C-alpha cells in the first residue's frame, strides 16, 4: 500500500494518457495489458499494480516505454506477486527524460 501512495504522489503532477486493456492472472503474477499515448522519441514510465481479493497490493512494477513508437502504443507487462492476485491495473504513467 505504501508503494502505491508514493508512486501516486510522484506521478500525479505529470500524467500521460493511458488505458487499461485487461489483465490475466496466473499463479505467480498478473499480465497487465495497456495502452499509453506518447510522442515520437519520448519515454514514458508507468506504475502497474496487482491486487488480491481484499484489494491489497500484492505486486507492483515500474515499466519504461520508448523511445520507439509514437501515438497510442500497446504494451503487456508481467507483475510478479507475493501472494495470489485477482486483478492488475495501471496506476499512472508519466514522461521521463
Image: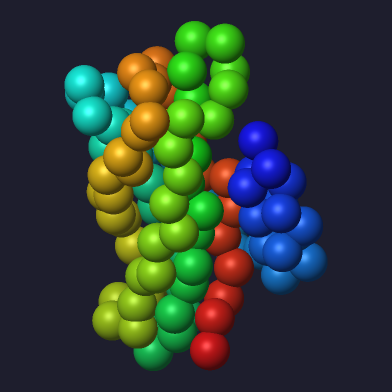
Which part of the image, by quadrant, shows the N terminus? top right
Q: In the image, is 32 to the left or to the right of 47?
A: left
What residue sits 28% from the left and 81% below the top? 68
Residue farthest along the left direction in this orientation: 27
Tell me how many marks there are: 0
Q: Is residue 44 visible?
A: yes
What residue sits 37% from the left and 70% below the top? 65
Q: Could you tell me residue 29's position as x and y percent?
A: 28, 32
What residue sits 47% from the left and 30% below the top? 58
In the image, residue 41 sits, relative to residue 34, either above or below, namely below
Q: Could you tell me residue 4's position as x and y percent?
A: 64, 44
Which residue is nearer to you in this view: 32 or 38?
Answer: 32
Residue 30 image-quadrant placement: top left
Q: Could you tell me residue 3's position as x and y percent?
A: 63, 47
Which residue is nearer to you in this view: 12 or 81?
Answer: 81
Q: Could you tell me residue 6's position as x and y percent?
A: 71, 54
What residue sits 69% from the left and 43% below the top? 2
Residue 96 image-quadrant placement: bottom right
Q: Is residue 72 visible?
A: no
In the image, residue 54 sits, relative to residue 25, either above or below, namely above
Q: In the image, is 24 to the left or to the right of 19?
A: left
Which residue is nearer to you in this view: 12 or 41?
Answer: 12
In the image, residue 48 sits, relative to residue 66, either above or below, namely above
Residue 50 image-quadrant placement: top left
Residue farthest along the front direction in this orientation: 82
Amino acid at each position: 500500500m505504501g508503494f502505491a501512495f508514493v508512486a501516486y504522489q510522484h506521478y500525479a503532477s505529470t500524467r500521460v494518457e493511458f488505458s487499461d486493456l485487461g489483465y490475466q492472472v496466473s499463479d505467480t503474477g498478473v499480465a497487465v495489458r495497456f495502452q499509453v499515448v506518447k510522442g515520437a522519441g519520448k519515454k514514458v514510465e508507468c506504475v502497474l499494480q496487482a491486487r488480491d481479493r481484499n484489494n491489497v497490493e500484492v505486486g507492483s512494477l515500474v515499466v519504461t516505454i520508448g523511445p520507439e513508437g509514437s501515438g497510442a502504443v500497446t504494451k503487456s507487462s508481467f507483475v510478479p506477486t507475493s501472494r495470489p492476485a485477482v486483478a492488475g491495473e495501471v496506476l499512472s504513467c508519466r514522461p521521463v527524460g
